[in-house]
Image (cartoon, rainbow, N blue to C red):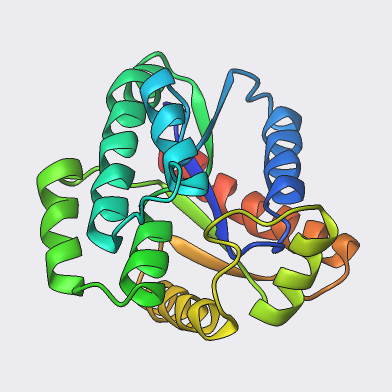
Amino acid sequence: MTGKFIVIEGLEGAGKTTAINTVARILKQHNINDLQFTREPGGTPIAEALRDIIKNGIDDEPLTDKAELLMLYAARIQLIDNVIKPALKLGKWVIGDRHDLSTQAYQGGGRQLDKTFIEMLKQQVLGDFKPDLTLYLDIDPEVGLMRAKSRGELDRIEQQSLLFFNRIRQRYQEIAQNDNTIITIDAAQTIEDVVRQIEQVLATWLSKQVSNV
């Protein structure tokens, strides 16, 4: 098989790290060992600098919602052109911690920016590039935020209101229902059950990839 791009998505506290580790383990069990891990925003020096601004801001200057959106796409295209596409071209499998679906949900849903504008920006920056598979970890925002708080101090985005995160979840769910490359995982289950569901989903998906070769 050629290299594939698999992305893990979800709200804060949904268990993305566990999911990423599970996906990597399953791929290795299928003799897919040449893996590249990415995170968004971030993954290159320029993208990481933008991540720091997005997450923490600079001094007391307010970061506007549209500036945040533009920074996210700037960071994303740096990562795609300099890391993801070269890795895929070499036959590597890329496992991403977030991708464009996060922007659709956080900026389109949470920030309530114009969805047509975001879609236009997406097409101009990304074109037809998208993940081969996205696992969306669905969780009640209140539960996810409690988990996030238990990890330590919250960043600028994690400090937003519960209503903000409810809008994000709603947008995630809307998009996932209409895209057959996005599979929803119930992240409210026990860790063992989440892992088991990911194993089942990925095993089924991988078998289809083999049959299509």
Question: How many numbered marks does the figure carry?
Answer: 0
Q: Residue furthest top?
A: 90
Q: Is there any visible trace of residue 98 in the rendered image?
A: no
Residue 149 percent coordinates (x, y): 78, 63
**In the depicted view, which residue is nearer to us: 90 or 188?**
188
Instruction: Give the answer, above or below, for where 35 lies relative to 201.
Output: above
Q: Is there any visible trace of residue 174 in the rendered image?
A: yes
Residue 128 percent coordinates (x, y): 18, 46
Residue 165 percent coordinates (x, y): 54, 77
**In the depicted view, which residue is nearer to us: 79 or 202?**
79
What's the residue at 51%, 47% (across, down)?
Answer: 55
Instruction: Give the answer, above or below, for where 34 lies relative to 58.
Output: above
Image quarter in which the C terminus is found? top left
The answer to which image quadrant residue 139 occupies is: bottom right
Q: Is residue 130 left or right of residue 19?
A: left
Instruction: Give the answer, above or below, for where 88 lies relative to 202.
Output: above
Q: Is residue 158 left or right of residue 65?
A: right
Q: Is residue 98 left or right of residue 197?
A: left
**In the depicted view, which residue is nearer to us: 118 or 61?**
61
What's the residue at 39%, 35% (across, down)?
Answer: 50
Residue 114 percent coordinates (x, y): 18, 74
Instruction: Give the answer, above or below, for where 14 lies relative to 71.
Output: below
What's the residue at 71%, 57% (across, down)?
Answer: 198
Q: Is residue 186 left or right of residue 79?
A: right
